[in-house]
Amino acid sequence: MNRKLAAASIIICVGMLCLSFKVQRVEAIGTIYIRADGSIDPPTAPISTVDNITYILTGNITSDADGIVIERDNTIVDGAGYTVQGAGGGTGIGLSGRSNVTINNITANNGGCGIELSDSSNNTIYGNNVTDNSIGIYIFSSNNNNIAGNKVTNNSYGIRLDYSSNSMLRNNAMDSNGCNFGVYGDLPSHFLNDVDASNTVDGKPVYYWINRQDMEIPSDCGCLALVNCTHITAKNLKITNNLEGILLVSTTNSTISGNNITANDVHGVCLLNSSNNTMSGNNITANRIDGIDLGDSSDNTMSENNITNSDFCGIQLGHSSNNTITGNNITNNDSGIELGSSSNNTITGNNITTNWLGIKLGDSSNNTLTKNKMANNQIGIEFMNSSNNIIYSNNFVDNTARQAYIYSYVSNNVWDNGYPSGGNYWSDYNGVDTNHDGLGDTQYIIDANNTDHYPLMNIIPEFPSLLILPLFFIATLLAVIIYKREKV
């Protein structure tokens, strides 16, 4: 009996050894190329073709570099359900400068990028399973591609389109990725892609609207982009784990309110070339770059938002003018509010606390800052090459390194509203008020070009929320009516 068991064990072991040899023969170490002339390099790779048009995988591929590089146009690469597995870097299937290539029915995992198209057009990626990569499907500087029916899960980034236009996305399921979906670019044309609500992020539809007007975003929205839209309302949404939580491009007169926008990879809310929009009452938390970002955008209002725990800015304006930032709570960001090359903006009544830097102005002029509280930041406010800004009736309280700092270049600004209105409250001001007018007898000097001539002796009371003011007015009016009735 023991001899029979030993013989059986030997047979099993030999079978397993043969099986391992068989698996090894259908694996390739290194990069496999489908060359421009139609050949497969190396010819021993587990890929077959009979017409140099359709290439079919005949086994799994494991690569310590790029998996498959396609150098031939007008081809079909059918994975037949097999896997292209990386070693944590490189690209599973890559196209560069190619057109009319179809990639389908492949599992691409554990690579730097599962499937990548760059400088390519009119390609199709469908029915693939893309998992555990740094980027699942990456479309870079490419146009007119069709991306459909893919399952993209557990990647750092799911599907990302950068500097690309006119691609169509249908029925892609992006689940449990660090960042599920995003489109990035610096021209309005980079955002003209056809993405419908059959695409989902963690089971919720992507609403990517172009040329819409007078509509409200459905409440099940998982990711939102508005391109060339007007009079759109987005309210009470929960949006998380995308490149941009809410993206507005060339969009006007729309309202973003009461939303919970968290843990997006770049911005919570991003406006590009957009005007006359309102963002109010949103909770914008733990977005990696900025809470709210405006680029080349004007006449927008950001009010009563709670913006916390961004790695960079709570609110950032770049090349943007005539915007209003009012009544926001901005805490625990690297910078609270940052203006770059932006002018004629109004920043008023904001609570800007426990950031590294409260407010920063770089190459920005003619902005007005009033009634803000800058407290317990490392630096309360910083200027770099920024002049003709007006700063008064603000509270600067216990900013540990500098209350106000002029960082390089000359900046000449106005720090008070004259007498008797006065300037700002500075918690480290050690002057006296002999005539009891509420203003210090000596100036608060920031540097040779910046002086608060009338520093306030007492901290300005907390500024009431703009949402509370109408309620206060109504309550006061009702009290007056009741008083008059009782008196009669």
Image (tube, rainbow, N blue to C red):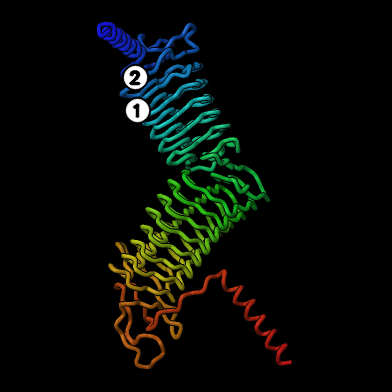
126 is higher (above) or lower (below) than 330: above
Report if residue 14 is visible in the image.
no
How far across and how far down the image is residue 319, in percent? 46, 55
Q: Are marks 1 and 2 in contact (CB under 8 Å)?
A: yes
Circle 1 — which element? loop
Disc number for residue 31: 2
Q: What residue is rendered at 62% in x and 81% in y?
A: 476
How far across and how far down the image is residue 229, in percent? 62, 47
294 is higher (above) or lower (below) than 93: below
Is 415 or 107 nearer to us in this picture? 107
Quadrant placement of the C terminus: bottom right
| Alpha-carbon span between mark 1 and mark 2 | 9 Å
Residue 230 lies left or right of residue 167; in this view the side is right
How far across and how far down the image is residue 105, in percent? 50, 21
Name the residue carrying label 1: 90
Is 18 or 118 nearer to us in this picture? 18
Is 364 or 328 nearer to us in this picture? 328
- The amino acid type of the residue labelled 2 equals Thr
Q: What residue is rendered at 32% in x and 27% in y?
A: 87
Q: What residue is rendered at 42% in x and 71% in y?
A: 373
339 is higher (above) or lower (below) than 11: below
Mark before the other along the chain sequence, 1 or 2: 2
Q: Residue furthest front?
A: 1
